[in-house]
């Protein structure tokens, strides 16, 4: 999360030699709960981001935005975790409604948010942050499978899935494993009768992958 601190200190998406800033090092090692960016030495050595930082760029940007609003502290990250859990719960409800009545969908959602494995993973932001994106892809694929879509609807869902996968890859790189599966499942969906069905399916696959690569770069 060092680049997130540096962004709030006005240095952009960069790193720093934390040996020159013991208080910052203590914060990043979870020895303190907050950090005042004004304490950052003015002559600290600025370094370019490493590949691992670029792989998690969206996660770092989310942390930086949270800290910009609430201050640089680990307690502020809890707000981000609650938001991620809330979004995940909404998506679980939406997925459940594809096959279940409202009451049963609420029970499934309640079981999700009270599940021990979910709550344990919640406190590891890097791991849990991909959950809303995975669930969003599942919901979009569920809609595509359940409903007989028009060509425009089919292409729109393909675009949304690609963007969701690409943005999610900026939180966790293993999101890319879902891309081939999403293409295969989307290709198997029913469409409303039309003259160029094969072309539409091919265009949807290309649109999905194009959106995935465009929004996932440089992750």
Image (cartoon, rainbow, N blue to C red):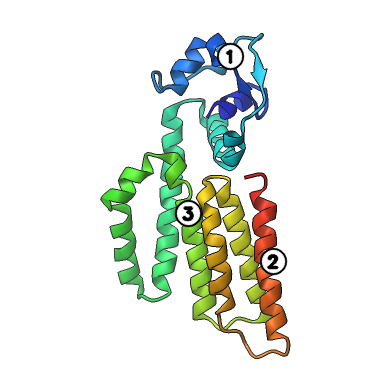
Residue in the image at 53% along x and 73% along y: 185
Mark 3 element type: helix
Q: Badge 1, how many Cα within 10 Å: few under 14, some, many 20+?
A: few
Q: CA distance from mark 2 to mark 3?
A: 22 Å
Q: Which residue is mark 3?
A: 132
Q: Is residue 101 left or right of residue 189?
A: left
* Chain-order first, disc 2 or disc 3: 3
CA–CA distance between discs 1 and 3?
A: 34 Å
- Most foreground residue, 58 or 68: 58
Task: Check disc 2: other Cα within 10 Å, few if <14, some if 14-19, many if 20+.
Answer: many
Of the pair 158 and 172, the residue shown nearer to us: 172
Residue at 44% from the left image edge and 66% from the top image edge:
94
154 relative to 99 in the view: left or right: right
Position of 38 relative to 10 (above/below): above
Spot occupied by residue 87 in the image (x, y as percentages of width and height): 46, 53
The residue identified by callout 2 is 207
Q: Secondary structure at mark 1?
A: helix
- Looking at this view, is 37 or 206 the one in front? 206
In the image shown, does 2 or 34 lie closer to the viewer? Answer: 2
Circles 2 and 3, Cβ within 8 Å, touching? The answer is no
Relative image position of residue 16 (x, y in whole percent): 61, 19
Q: Which residue is mark 1?
A: 38
Q: Is residue 148 above or below residue 2?
A: below
Report which quarter residue 51 is drawn in: top right
Q: Is residue 19 above or below residue 108?
A: above
Number of residues whose C-alpha sits closer than 10 Å to that of mark 3, classed few (under 14), some (14–19) or many (20 or more) = many
Real-space Cα separation, disc 1 to disc 2, in angstroms: 45 Å
């Amino acid at each position: 999360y060092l680049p997130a601190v540096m962004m709030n200190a006005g240095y952009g998406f960069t790193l720093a030699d934390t040996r020159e800033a013991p208080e910052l090092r203590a914060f990043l090692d979870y020895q303190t709960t907050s950090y005042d960016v004004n304490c950052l030495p003015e002559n600290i050595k600025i370094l370019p981001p490493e590949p691992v930082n670029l792989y998690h760029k969206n996660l770092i940007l989310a942390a930086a935005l949270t800290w910009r609003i609430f201050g640089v502290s680990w307690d502020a990250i809890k707000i981000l975790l609650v938001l991620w859990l809330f979004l995940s719960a909404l998506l679980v409800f939406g997925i459940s409604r594809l096959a279940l009545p409202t009451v049963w969908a609420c029970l499934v959602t309640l079981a999700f948010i009270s599940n021990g494995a979910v709550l344990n993973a919640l406190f590891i932001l890097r791991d849990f942050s991909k959950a809303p994106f995975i669930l969003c892809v599942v919901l979009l694929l569920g809609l595509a499978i359940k409903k007989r879509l028009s060509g425009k609807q089919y292409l729109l869902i393909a675009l949304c899935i690609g963007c969701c996968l690409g943005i999610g890859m900026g939180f966790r790189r293993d999101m890319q494993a879902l891309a081939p599966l999403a293409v295969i499942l989307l290709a198997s969906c029913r469409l409303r009768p039309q003259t160029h069905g094969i072309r539409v399916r091919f265009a949807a696959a290309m649109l999905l992958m194009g959106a995935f690569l465009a929004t996932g770069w440089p992750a």
